[in-house]
Image (tube, rainbow, N blue to C red):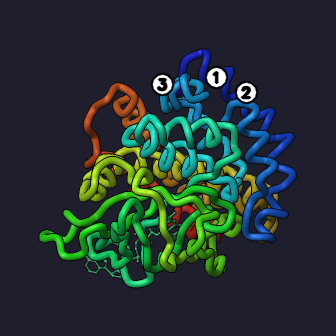
């Protein structure tokens, strides 16, 4: 179905990105999946070509577009299954924290490099004992003079090996009540003494994606690296949830469409009992149901993308979309296998 959220400029941008991805990304996907991570040179090329920070402010080197330009990139990468290169994590999940809450000094220091692909970003929330229950994190960033000294361990951190700058969620006041009021966000450069990269984790899926452990051992960063205000970390994380969940739904529905297309291609060429598998009525019923769900999901995601760009508050709806599209992705892969 014709999608009506994209303008002619978005369409041209998609063509440009598709050409870039065909030349610079697609040929490397198998190697990235085998190695468990992407490479810096491709990130730099993406930055040079203007594909990092497509919606970041122009004064720091961004293209100043709306999120639909970034959505184009997410969709194209999801279609070719380039999970190793998490542009959305860099441009649409991490960068907005610096844009929204960074001081002028932080923005000038980090945004131009991030947009060029020289400074790769990550966010470190999750800990070995704490996932969804974020208020319970144990990593501490205790102020000593003009530094915060970080101690603690993180896990499942995307870009953990390749990243240069991490937004670290830590407790600046471990005694705060309620606990979430003690949480702050601290920018930690990967070359800071005491910043330790742990294991790159082996995963069943997203094999090209670099998901790692990190730890902080008396890792001292200047107080000027505090992002926003002390004790406001939890609030900032919640404020950014809308875009983060929408980003996942946007890529996920494209992954669903890709799995469906691959299944259709397979059942057309595979024969059983003297006919293509696609000729069985049960196969046709199943595929028709799944195709319907993909169209319904895309319509929902498009409606949410348009609403998000308009500035509507839709955190409830994007949460529904994240759950529904990722669930469909699992179901589709399972049904397609049968
Ligand atoms: C590929 C990948 C990339 C990731 N990248 C990052 C990243 O870049 N940065 C980052 O900080 N994190 C990252 N994560 C971590 C991710 O955000 C966490 O997995 C998520 O927060 C959930 O935490 P958890 O896995 O510890 O599980 P939790 O949600 O904490 O669950 C732990 C256990 O408790 C159960 N449970 C949870 N809630 C309830 C409840 N209400 N009632 C009953 N039982 C419950 C669950 O079923 C589970 O058994 C990544 C994870 C993956 C898989």
In this rendered view, identify the residue nearer to me: 122 or 110: 110
Mark 1 element type:
helix
In this rendered view, identify the residue nearer to me: 33 or 110: 110
Nearest to N terminus: mark 1 or mark 3: 3
In this rendered view, identify the residue nearer to me: 234 or 10: 234
Nearest to N terminus: mark 2 or mark 3: 3
- Eyeballing the image, is 135 above or below 21? below
Q: Can see residue 279?
A: no
Residue 282: name its quadrant: bottom right
Q: Residue at x 56, y 43 (%)?
A: 110
- Eyeballing the image, is 24 above or below 7? below
Residue 220 picture location, percent across and down: 48, 68
Residue 1, label in figure: none
Look at the numbered discs 2 and 1 and tell me whether their residues touch, using CB distance below 8 Å.
yes
Where on the image, by quarter, is ligand 1?
bottom left
Q: Can see residue 89?
A: yes
Structural crowding at the residue carrying mark 2, measured as other residues with C-alpha within 10 Å and reported as few (<14), some (14–19) or many (≥20)? some
Task: Compute the Cα span from label 2 to label 3.
Answer: 16 Å
Q: Which residue is mark 1?
A: 11
Q: Which residue is mark 3?
A: 5
Task: Compute the Cα span from label 2 to label 1.
Answer: 6 Å
């Amino acid at each position: 179905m014709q999608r009506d959220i994209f303008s002619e400029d978005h369409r041209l941008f998609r063509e440009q990105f598709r050409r870039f991805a065909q030349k610079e990304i697609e040929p490397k996907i198998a190697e990235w999946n085998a190695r468990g991570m992407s490479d810096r040179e491709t990130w730099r090329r993406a930055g040079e070509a203007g594909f990092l920070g497509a919606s970041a402010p122009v004064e720091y080197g961004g293209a100043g577009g709306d999120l639909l330009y970034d959505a184009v990139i997410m969709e194209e990468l999801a279609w070719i299954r380039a999970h190793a290169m998490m542009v959305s994590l860099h441009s649409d999940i991490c960068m907005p924290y610096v844009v929204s809450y960074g001081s002028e000094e932080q923005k000038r220091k980090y945004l131009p490099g991030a947009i060029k692909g020289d400074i790769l970003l990550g966010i470190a929330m999750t800990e070995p004992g704490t996932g969804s229950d974020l208020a319970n994190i144990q990593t501490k960033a205790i102020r000593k003079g003009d530094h915060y000294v970080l101690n603690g361990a993180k896990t499942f951190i995307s870009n953990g090996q390749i990243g240069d700058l991490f937004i670290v969620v830590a407790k600046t006041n471990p005694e705060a009540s309620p606990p979430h009021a003690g949480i702050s966000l601290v920018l930690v450069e990967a070359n800071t003494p005491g910043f330790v990269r742990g294991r790159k984790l082996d995963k069943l899926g997203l094999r090209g994606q670099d998901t790692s452990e990190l730890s902080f051992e008396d890792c001292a960063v200047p107080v000027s690296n505090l992002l926003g205000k002390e004790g406001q970390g939890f609030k900032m994380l919640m404020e950014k949830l809308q875009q983060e969940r929408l980003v996942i739904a946007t890529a996920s529905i494209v992954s669903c469409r890709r799995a469906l297309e691959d299944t259709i291609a397979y059942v057309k060429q595979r024969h059983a009992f003297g006919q293509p598998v696609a000729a069985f009525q049960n196969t046709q019923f199943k595929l028709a149901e799944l195709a319907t769900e993909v169209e319904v999901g895309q319509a929902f995601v498009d409606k949410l993308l348009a609403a998000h760009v308009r500035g509507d508050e839709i955190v409830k709806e994007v949460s529904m979309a994240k759950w529904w599209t990722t669930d469909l992705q699992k179901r589709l892969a399972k049904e397609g296998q049968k």
